[in-house]
Amino acid sequence: MATATEIGIAVLVLIGIIVSASTLVLTLDLAARVQRIEETVAPPPLTVIGPWSGAEMEAFLPVLETFTEETDIEVKYRIYRAEDLSPLLPAQFAARTTPGDVIFMWAWFISEMGPDGHALDVTDLIDEADFTTGALDPVKVDDTIYGGSYTGKVKPGFWYRKSFFNAHGLTPPTTWAEFTALLDEIADIDGIVNPIVSGDAVGWPLSDVTEHFIATYGGPQMHRGLTDGAVAWNSSQVRAVFEDRLVPLLEAGHFSEPTEWTAAVDLWWAGDYGLYFMGSWITGMVDDPTDLGVFSLPGATGLVFAADYFFIPAYTQHPDEAKQLFQFLAGADGQEVQVGEGGHIATNLDVSLDAYPAVDKGVAEILVGKEVLLDLDDTIGGDFQEEFWTQLKLLWVRPGDLDSVLAALDAKAP
Amino acid sequence: MKIRKSTIIVHIIAWSVALIWILPFLGVLMAAIRPFPEILHGWWNFAEFNPSLKNFVEAWSHSSAPLGQGMLNSFLVAIPSTLIPMFVASLTGYGFARFSFPIRDYIFLTVVLIMALPQQMIAVPIFQIMTSLGLVNNYISLILVHSAWGLAWIILFMRNFFLRLPIEIEEAAKVDGASDFKIFYKIVLPMALPALASVAVLQFMWVWNDFFLALILIQSPDKLLATQRIPLMREVHHVDWSVLSAASILVMLVPILIYVLLQKYYIRGMIGWTVKG
Amino acid sequence: MTRRKKITSLKNFPLFFSPAIILIVFFVAYPVLQTVYVSFFSPTEEFVGLGNYFDVLSRKEILNVEGFPKWPPLGALIHNLLWILIHLPLSMFSGLVLAVILRDVKGASIVKSAIFLGMVTPLIVGGIILRFTFERGVGIVNAFFNVLGVEQLARTWTAYPETALFALIFGSVWLWTGFSMIIYSAGLATIPKEYYEAAKIDGATPFRTFFRITFPLLKPMTITVVTMTILWELKIFDIVFVATRGGPGWASTVLAYQMWLYAFRDLNFNNAAAVATFLTFLTLFVTIGMIRYMVRR
């Protein structure tokens, strides 16, 4: 049996932990509540709801400030991620109310709400020709546009260190033959483990590379077809993309085994690998972004572009001001402020290349004249996405299993 | 006294096993206190060695997935999820110990069966119940489920404890006219403190370490618990191995501290509910 | 056990029992029954009997018949069985051996604490540590095999279907051995010293003593360790979720993980319910064995 003292100490320790933790929690909760009360006092005319917090929010607020300067319309920003909004909005809309006047949300959600009358028809507010090809398709239903496309992140292709390329006399390829020759050259460099490092996370870095191959050598048409189920994974055209392009590279050892994607950045930067396929956010992940260069697979006509979308709920109390803000966010003026903060690429074609920080300019240039595509597995989601991820991880280390991989994808495809 | 050869061998084996066992933890610790580029080719390389707590700070207040908030959330869930079943189960355990029931074996059977259940068995209906009650993303849902889930073993554990308490004091109090409930919380509960400590330690740790129930019931980013943030940090946010290691250490620090401080109660609880049944 | 003493006059019956009953009925009993019920119906609420069970058992990620007799992926069911087959003896015997030899070791409590660390670590963190330990470059496992010159194993274990499952199984041995060690240590402390003194006088070897005296007397602990370990192995989820997500190509998936995928990624609650019920059937099968032993005792 424990002595009374020991029990006493044990209980005291427990109570101590509990009391200190609860005090901490309560204080923080209280602080949060006070803040909330402060926020609700004197409501501004317009409320924008977006997903960004922290540093991303700091990059977004200047856009709203510029709008206020130009129009004298006050704008309040509130943070709600799409995941939190999706259960919330339908109920609010059913009650004919809305938590915001302009809301950033998933494109598919907007295109579902629009025809039901919950989102304002904005077809006349913007001109489709001002936007990158395909950018407004996700929010368009039968020629009626229900939302605007903002800026976003692009998955442009393979990144390299300019200093590394210069040191070894390498140049970005312009043809498939040059690309494979480049890989062979890199493979022969001392200290190189594989020419391309493959990032491993839940599965997305591999799926991004694969989509780039599909969009380039199968064309944007095939990419869209696979996304909406019009094209079968084990059809001969799709198989050809894998058999002729991706699998030979895997078999030749040009791709590394899947490596933790954040570690892959450092290893690639340190010279263990020559190329890394990543989205435009890589500029924020390396020590010296000015040393970054990027090229798409030769012949690419379409790129995956994860743009943000926004809409005006039909129940806004200030439709005129909301429309003004909508046009500002969709227009070149608003997007120029955002891309100037770095890390974002505009969907509005009137945004000048000079508006970009030097590191993003390369990506913006690559996008010129390209068709934009939705991320394939994010769009389909569900169990297909899990299957896609796990099968690609298998393909990466067992390229010979292509048949079973494609069969498995076909079985789960939409 | 001459040291026998076998004694030396046994010591060598025991200590090497301990060393092997601690290696993975050591690796994570090394990763956590050093900048990641230093350990790119193994944490055992000490060509450069600049230990700091920077990674811990970054993990704690990461801009898009702050672990500090997750730890607070975990406390917010784990404390009530420990206290509620502790008291509810003590009541019931006492009832079982002091009532004359012909069904003792059935209770034991039920409890053991509940302990055998995988959480997957309740996941979907729980999700549906909580959705219809509007309690998804609300800690109340998680606290209720954890409480109910922990009840079975705590009832059994407390019942076994109460059975060993001398009944005479309670009978004397009863003669003095005290109510059943008063006897319970004035006399019985104070005597049960060591058992309650074991229960608290084990239950708190299980709730703190739980991932599956939280995964199902809590989805909103600012409400995620500490354990939920770990996989997110690895897969989605730009967090390198070093910061991730620091985050992992922070999350495991709480159960380890409890174990170190209250080891006796932990072990007693562990052995009590498994061996003695 | 103490003789049961009774206070038959305990009056506040509902006060003592209703809170627990309410909680258990609403959040354990009803969900369990609901899961069983749902497992017999199609998504359109038609009764399909064992249809969902046949459906999931015919899926590659649950049972990959073509995989035999090769390496994984063999399907979640087989992976769970492999887990038991490898993990149970390894963790049980290392725990037992450690418990036995640590009796005569100086600093045993430190060694025990080091080994027990895995038991208090959240499994989600355990999974991260495994992933880290088996990663090429930063991980020590690969460095170790590199030194030995075994190139086949000097790589990121979790990236290859041949090794992913085994990385997780060995890792879970590392996490779980503390359990059997602690239980056996407690059991050993209950064996009277006289038994060993008698054996010594008879001139029995340490091995003979172990198999004739120690092991038989530890039978209750063995039953506990075997039961709890198998239950733990069947319920494995967190490690798989965080370290491999069941991949590559489902080479390291397990039933509990597959259930989550069906329920919350595929939103097929019926198939998920069938997997959950099947998994519960397996755990009950194990538990009933233990109960029969306990009742006989």
Image (tube, grey):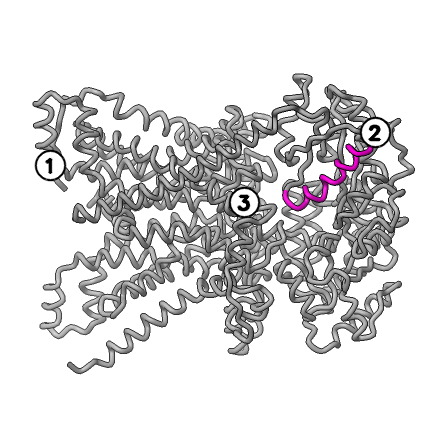
In which quarter of the view is residue C109 placed? bottom left
Q: Secondary structure at mark 3?
A: helix
Specify whether residue C92 is in view: yes
Q: Quadrant of the C terminus of chain A?
A: top right
Q: Which residue is mark 3?
A: C258
Mark 3 touching mark 1, by CB under 8 A?
A: no
Tell me which residue sits at (86%, 65%) in the image: A173
Subunit that carries the residue with mark 1: B
The alpha-carbon separation of the residues under discs 3 and 2 comes to 40 Å
Q: Amino acid at mark 3?
A: Gln
Chain at numbered mark 2: A
Mark 1 surroundings: few (<14), some (14-19) or many (≥20) residues within 10 A? few
Name the element at disc 1: loop
Residue under label 2: A145
- Residue A390 lies, in percent from the top left, at 63, 52
Marks 3 and 1, how far apart at CA: 50 Å
Q: Is residue A411 magenta?
A: no
Q: Residue C65 placed where, x, y %?
A: 56, 52
> Outermost residue toward the top?
A95
Question: Could you tell me residue B168's position as x and y percent?
Answer: 8, 32
Q: Which residues are magenta?
A: A54-70
Please name which of the two marks, 3 or 1, marks the residue nearer to the observer: 1
Q: Residue at x 74, y 68 (%)?
A: A274
Give the camera-side residue of B127 and C153.
B127
Kindly identify the amino acid type of the residue bearing the numbered disc 2. Ile
Q: Nearer the viewer, residue A226 or A197?
A: A197
Q: Which residue is mark 1?
A: B166
Does dot 2 land on a helix, a strand or a loop? strand
